[in-house]
Image (cartoon, grey):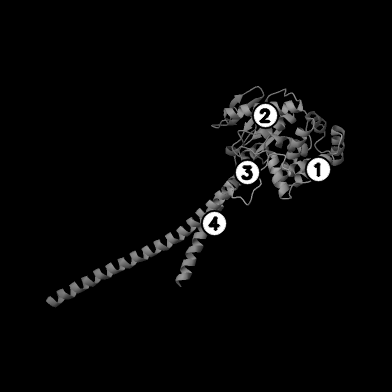
Amino acid sequence: MRLRHILKIVLFVLALFGLGWLYVTGVASLSDLVARYLRGDLFSRSAEPLPDGEWEWVAETDHFVYYARTGDTIPRWAIEMHESVLAQVAGVLDVTVASKIRYFRYASQGDIYDAIAQRSTGVTRAGDEGIEIHSTQRYHPHEVAHAVIHQQWDPPAFLDEGLATVYGWDWDVPEADVHVHAYKFLQEERLLPVASILTNWGFHLYKTYPAYSTAGSFMKYLLDARDPKAMRALLRLEKFSQRQELEDAFLDAYGETIYEVEREWQDALAAGMFSQPAPAAPITTERTAMLLSGAVLLAGLFLSSVVAIVMAERAFASLVRASRWLLHFGATNHTSGVLAARNGE
C-alpha cells in the first residue's frame, strides 16, 4: 500500500515536469498561433518604416540603412562587419552596389511572418526602394551576401544559398568554417550528392542544414581553387534552370564537369585539407558535458521533488496526528474535570 502511494507521488511529479516542459517548448509556438489567428491591429506589422514609430531608424552607412523595432538597436560592430562582408563579396564577384540596402531587424520569426508572410530568420528580397534584408539577427552576413548577389542575379538555390553560406549562416557564434560542417556530414555519410541539389526543386527537397552545408562547402572550394570571376557565368542562370543547363554552364565556365570538381572537393575534404575538428578518441565535448550536467541536475531535481513531497506529506501527517492528540488530550481533561466537579457536588 505504501509503495502504491509513493508511485502516485512519482507520477504526480512527472506530470508537473511534463506540464513545465510543454509550457517552455510550446509557449513560442502558441504565441505565434495566437498572433496569426487572433491578432487585430495590435499585432499588425509592416515592412515599411512607419511614422508612428513602429520602425525606428537606427543607423546609415555607405551601403546600408538600418531600422529596428521601437526600443531595439543594432550594435556598431555588426554594422561595421556588414560593410566588410559586403566589400568582400562584391570584390570577389566584381559587383557594384548601386543603391543602399535597407536592413530591417525583427523581434522574432513570427514578427517577420506577420510582415512579409515568410517564416525565416532572414529573407533578402527586392522592395520598392531596392534590395531589402529582413532579419531576426543583428549580424547576418549570410543575408548580406544574398543582397550583393541579387544586385545583378537571381540564380538557382544551389548557387545562391551555397555562395551566401560561404560567408555565414545561423550556426554557433563565432561561426565555424563551412568545411567543418561538410566534413562532419562526410564522416556520417550524409553529405549530399551535388547532382541531387542542383535545381531549385532538388535543393529544397532536403533539410536545410545538410543542403546548405553541402552547397556552401562546395562553393567555397570552387572560389578558393578556381578563378572566382568564373562564378559570374553561373550566376547568370535563371532560378528555375534545369540540371542540364547548370551542368553545361559549369563546363563552359571552368572547362571541366561539375562532377569532376565534386570528386576533387570530396577527396580534399576527406584528406583533411580544410579546417576541421581534430580527430580523436571518443570525446566528451563541452556541449556533451553540458547535456550530461543538465541531465544530472534534472534527475536530481526530480528525485529531490519526490523526496520533498514525501517528507512534506509525512510532516503534515505528523502535524495532523499531533493536533488530534492535543484535541483528544484537551477533550479528555475537560471531561475529567466535569466528572470531578459533579462528584464533588
> Mark 2 or mark 4, which is nearer the start of the sequence?
4
Instruction: Between label 4 and label 2, give the one nearer the viewer.
Output: 2
- Which residue type carries mark 2? Val
Decide if residue 338 is in sight here: yes
Instruction: Between label 3 and label 1, give the one nearer the viewer.
Output: 1
- Which residue type carries mark 1? Arg
Q: Is residue 208 above or below residue 84?
A: below
Q: How far across and how far down the image is residue 91, in percent?
A: 73, 25
Left-right relation of 166 to 296: right
Nearer-the-camera pick, 13 or 119: 13
> Mark 1 or mark 4, which is nearer the start of the sequence?
4
Instruction: Report the residue marked by disc 1.
Output: 263
Decide if residue 49 is in sight here: no
- Which residue type carries mark 4? Gly
Q: Residues within 10 Å of mark 2 (few under 14, many from 20)?
A: some
Find out whether the residues at labels 2 and 3 contact each other: C-beta distance under 8 Å: no
Q: Residue at x 46, y 73 (%)?
A: 1
Marks 1/2: CA distance? 29 Å
Instruction: Report the residue marked by disc 4.
Output: 18
Instruction: Report the residue marked by disc 2.
Output: 85
Instruction: Between label 1 and label 2, give the one nearer the viewer.
Output: 1
Q: How far across and how far down the image is residue 3, in percent?
A: 47, 70
Q: How far across and how far down the image is residue 219, in percent?
A: 76, 37
Query: SS of the residue at dot 1?
Result: helix
Left-right relation of 322 to 27: left
